[in-house]
Image (spheres, rainbow, N blue to C red):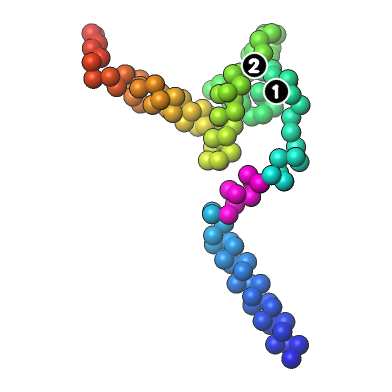
Amino acid sequence: MTYLFYSTLTLLTFILTTLAYLFRATWLPHLSQSRTASYLYSRLPGNSSFEADMEAGLSSSNFDLNTNLAAGDSRSGLDEGAKREILQIMKKRRLKFDEARRVYMEQRFAANGIGADGRPRDPKFVSFS
């Protein structure tokens, strides 16, 4: 009798684990958005500088913030709204900084009526070359 109970329990656990693995794309994004994860770690407010931006992963070889730090740049860092959106793109789509920055710029271009090639999508647009 005990053998039957444990074998059924093992089979049920195996089936549930397999189903959770197969459908992880549907439940995994909800896990990171849960309220319990928000209090585990949060950055201190007001730390808006190029050094903090580099620590957050908002720097690459194509978008180098080291030169700003080396030059002693006193500006407050990158734009807060853009940083938030780029970090969100990086987290949701699991992209590196350069790709997330490209996606962000394409979204901004599309919102402002600019095509992917950089030209306006306005039908009245006339250019002379």
Q: Is residue 46 above or below residue 42?
A: above
Where residue 73 appears, x then y in whole percent?
67, 9
28 falls in the magenta region: yes
Q: Is residue 109 left or right of residue 41?
A: left
- Residue drawn at (67%, 18%), measured in percent from left and top? 50
- Which residue, given by chain and number where applicable, does mark 1 sit on? 52
Question: 33 and 7: which one is in front?
Answer: 33
Where residue 38 appears, x then y in whole percent?
71, 40
- Which residue, given by chain and number where applicable, does mark 2 sit on? 77
Quadrant in the picture for the N terminus:
bottom right
Highlighted range, magenta: 27-34
- The answer to which image quadrant residue 5 occupies is bottom right
Question: 26 and 54: which one is in front?
Answer: 26
Callout 1: 10 Å neighbours few (<14), some, many (20+)?
some
Type of amino acid under label 2: Gly
76 falls in the magenta region: no
Where residue 46 appears, x then y in whole percent?
73, 20
Quadrant in the picture for the C terminus:
top left
Numbered circle sitting on residue 8: none
Q: Is residue 9 left or right of residue 98?
A: right
Where residue 14 appears, x then y in whole percent?
63, 72
- How far apart are the two marked residues, 2 and 1, measured between alpha carbons? 8 Å
Does the rendering let one see residue 67?
yes
Callout 2: 10 Å neighbours few (<14), some, many (20+)?
some
| Residue at the extreme front | 35
- Residue drawn at (69%, 44%), measured in percent from left and top? 35
SS category of the residue bearing label 2: loop
- Residue drawn at (29%, 22%), measured in percent from left and top? 121
SS category of the residue bearing label 1: helix
